[in-house]
Image: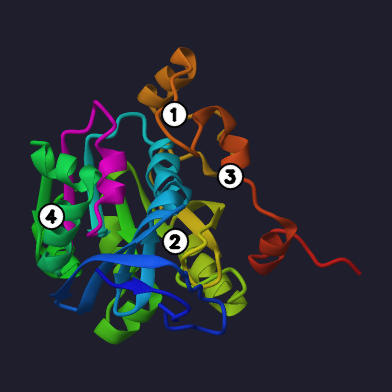
Amino acid sequence: MNRIRKKKLVHFYDGLGIALDGLECIGHTAGHYGKIALFRHEQLGKVFVLNGEIQHVEAWAPLYHEPLVHLAAAFVPVVRNVLILGGGTLYAAAEALKYKSVERVVVIDQDEAIIRFTTKFYSHAERCQSDTRFKVLHEDAYNYLGTSGERFDIVINDGADLLKMSQQRGCNLLDTITKAISPSGVCSDVVYRHVFEKSQVANTIRRLAKKCKLCMSLLCIPEYHGSLHLLTIWGRGTSFVNQNLRRPLNLEQQMWIRQRHARCVLYNPRFLAFHLYLPVYLKRIIGLTKKAA
């Protein structure tokens, strides 16, 4: 196996990407969207790379995937059906399957090679595949949403820029996703790029706030360009309680609190106020507070 040293592994955007040294290649294959590779880092574990860009670092996975799934689930009393758009590494699917109430987790990812690859190398992906509640579809996610008529308690957009894709496809994907959410359900979606893309963040929030109830969280995702990202959780159901939620509506998370049993590395339902905290910088961008004179 080849050891990569002092070689840039990622393509940099705005000088905000990262590179890791001392990586050992443990597998690679060709996928629908380019070259897929997996490396091992001595301290950080497995490093998943697509087309030369780091997608996921094993040690950092909870920073992104736990809030992506569990913070959204906190707003849903009982989670039965979960839809994940993208998410071929199956980290989000593994988190969703932690809920005993879950009856079905559907992952829609067009690149079948990614699913095969991650199942071969990741134990959590192998567990997903052996779970009878888990299903993978290899098709266009938004065509599926527009024609299936199904409803989900949580829809997770794992990686697509909804505003940009809406322009490219000549339709409003926010509306498409909203129609797929159950009456008490929510969508969990990280705003594309980083929080210092002020216009993109503000525009996305304005678009969402016009049609949905909305709450937000700041995520630290070291491997993604810019590190700091805004997680949005939105829906139109009567049980959705905006930023005022201090105790999870989710019955299983309430049980986690009573049992004091750690189901996650980062996310803790006892501290929703922490997870839903927004710094002044972000509040100014989205118009929740005014700049100091």
The local crowd at label 4, few if under 14, some if 14 to 19, many if 20 or more residues have their Cα within 10 Å, is few
User: For the view shown, which residue lies furthest in the right direction?
Assistant: 293
Q: Secondary structure at mark 2?
A: strand
Residue 85 appears left or right of 58: left
> Which of the two marks, 3 or 4, is nearer to us in this view?
3
Q: Which residue is mark 3?
A: 276
Relative depth, front residue between 270 and 75? 270
Residue beneath the point at 30% across and 49% down? 91
Type of residue at label 4? Gly
Q: CA distance from mark 3 to mark 4?
A: 31 Å
Question: Quick check: is 102 in the magenta stretch?
Answer: yes
The local crowd at label 2, few if under 14, some if 14 to 19, many if 20 or more residues have their Cα within 10 Å, is many
Q: Which residue is mark 1?
A: 249
| Residue stretch rendered in magenta on the structure | 88-109
Q: Upstream in the sequence, badge 2 or badge 4?
A: 4
Asked whether the residues under the numbered discs 1 and 3 touch, taking CB atoms below 8 Å apart as contact, a structural biologist would say no
